[in-house]
Amino acid sequence: SVGGGALWWNGKKEKEAELIYDMCHISDIKEWCYREGRTYWEYVELCEGSEIWEYLGEVWDTMTQAINRGLNKEGVLPGELKVARKAVKYFVKSDSYVGSLGSRAKIYAYALATAEENASGGRVATAPTCGSSGVVPAVLYHVQQSRHFSHQRILQALATAGLFANVTKKNASLSGAEVGCQGEIGVACAMAAAAASSKSTPYYGG
């Protein structure tokens, strides 16, 4: 895999997916949002069509299920290294912290739960890759729980995250094989930051 669903086969990259977005730089999309009084997620809906919301609903279900499974499993991960699962321990410990430390501890536990599900062959959502799949769901799950984000707002946030990932895929890479693990986790952090920003729109400062 070279990230974002693209594959190498016999030394050649498979045919690129059909171009859906007519702009491939955040600066251009941001300018369009200012001009039209729209949000990032509205641009996604315009390009993808209304059916994107059903798909993102499935993505979110996959993310939350991975977190919940990971938080309810103990023991060791499959493989010869016998690495112990730690997500549940950090989640329990998070209740002993207060303020921002408690929030960070919970986010870490959610991300680790997803990472452990990925490491054990469980079903996760690539965001943007399997190796970096814990960041986006952990951040959004936490803001849903702590800030009472509605289901629709979470989906809008996911649309925004996907837009930022798509721009990165177009102009750089999502693949650890191409840009290293730092590239994968860096894109995941950018996706999570964009998704969690207020109202997910440059018009309101998000």
Image: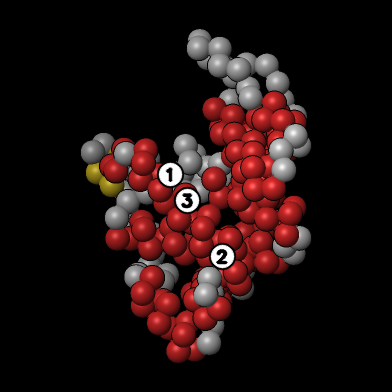
Question: Which of the 4 quarters of the picture holds residue 73?
Answer: top right
User: In the rendered view, would you say 121 is above or below 27?
Assistant: above
Q: Which residue is mark 3?
A: 189
Residue 155 drawn at (x, y percent): 64, 63
Left or right of 55, for residue 173:
left
Label 3 to label 2: alpha-carbon separation: 12 Å
Q: Specify the amino acid type for callout 2.
A: Ser
Q: Which residue is mark 2?
A: 197
Q: Which residue is mark 1?
A: 185
Mark 1 touching mark 3, by CB under 8 A? Answer: yes
Left or right of 141, for residue 200:
left
Q: Secondary structure at mark 3?
A: helix
Residue at the location (43% across, 83% down)? 32
Q: Which one is earlier in the sequence, the residue at label 3 or at label 2?
A: 3
Left or right of 3, for residue 120:
right
Q: Residues within 10 Å of mark 1 (few under 14, many from 20)?
A: many
User: In the rendered view, would you say 45 is above or below 176?
Assistant: below
Q: Secondary structure at mark 1?
A: helix
Label 1 to label 2: alpha-carbon separation: 18 Å
Q: Specify the amino acid type for callout 1.
A: Ile
Question: Which of the 4 quarters of the picture holds residue 42?
Answer: bottom right
Q: Specify the amino acid type for callout 3.
A: Cys
Residue 63: assigned label? none
Q: Is residue 26 visible?
A: yes
